[in-house]
Image (cartoon, rainbow, N blue to C red):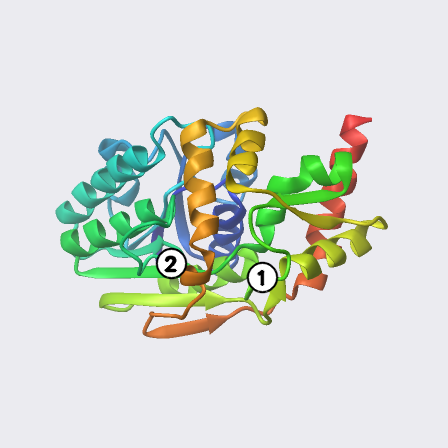
Amino acid sequence: MRIAVTTPTGHIGSKLVNILLDRKANVTVIARHPEKVKSLADRGAKVISGEHSYPAIVEEAVRGADALFWLTPGEMTSRDPLGEARRMADAGASVIRKNPDLHVVQLSSAGSFLPSGTGPILGLRDTEEKFRAAGKNIVSLRPNEFMENVFFSLPTIIGQGHIYTSLPGSVTAPMVATQDIAEVAAEFLLNPIDGHHVIDIVGPQEISFDDQARIAGESIGRTVRVVTLSGDSLKAAMKQSGMSAEMAALLVEMEEAYPKIQSGFHGEQKRTGKVTFPKFAREVFAPSYKKAVASAA
């Protein structure tokens, strides 16, 4: 199989490329900074320098390919996050139209079934719709809350032992590890299916934000707790950390829509991951926390 992959340095893309290489796929990656994917190149991946917001770059990557993995990255400092996501979707759709036999696996999100009020998820919904209009073989993956999202709180966990949110700590979600998302993406890239499909991806258990904080704390030997702020206070804190006002507003809007996002699943299939949050905390979060603390010392 010849497979093109976007965002090969991210939590999902990096794991996905290694899975594909392990399974002897012929992989091409699009990398904004080629030096960051040297380890993948050393394993045999072809590297194309550029950004997948440019159709010509994507066209080069999919030339002769059987499948494409597409992930729309969120730019935390963007002044127009939804506009950028829509322009990126347009770029991808233009390439898909020119390659009608290409099988595309697109990373979307839980909540993409909602038409409004979901913050940055709206950009992923727009991508789903544009890709389906452009191509005949599109699989949209809708994973739930990433376990790795706890890393957004790493600075405040290190400094204060706090995870800040506008949600009550008792709110639960079937959080999923990006390793499990990458495994599902690899499944559909290596064994492509024709037509339009939506696949929900969840973790092996419902977990509350309070439990997430407790388990993360246990893995690093300190107390970590959830602190619930008003939406306005959380937006102010996000902006103070360097996030754009526009992205902060969208993320708070997404949190406000959390009950609706978690209200049910709408894909034709559901995949359940294997990684539990305690395992993630021990094997992924704790080493990253210790590394961050050491580098700050």
* Residue carrying label 1: 171
Please state which of residues 149 and 161 is positioned toward the viewer in this rendering: 161
What SS does tag 2 mark? loop
Across and down, in percent, residue 227 comes to 67, 46
Residue 192 seen in this snapshot = no
In the rendered view, tell whether residue 179 sits above or below residue 236.
below
- Give the CA separation, mark 2 to mark 1: 16 Å
Across and down, in percent, residue 109 comes to 40, 56
**Which amino acid, mark 1?**
Val
Q: Residue furthest right?
A: 221
Q: Is residue 222 left or right of residue 130?
A: right
In the rendered view, tell whether residue 72 sits above or below residue 263.
above
Determine the residue positioned at 50% across, 67% down.
202
Please state which of residues 292 and 190 is positioned toward the viewer in this rendering: 292
* Residue carrying label 2: 111
Determine the residue positioned at 51% across, 57% down.
145
Instruction: Give the mark nearer the N terminus: 2 vs 1.
Output: 2
**Which amino acid, mark 2?**
Gly
Across and down, in percent, residue 59 comes to 23, 39
Please state which of residues 262 and 58 is positioned toward the viewer in this rendering: 262
Tally the numbered discs.
2
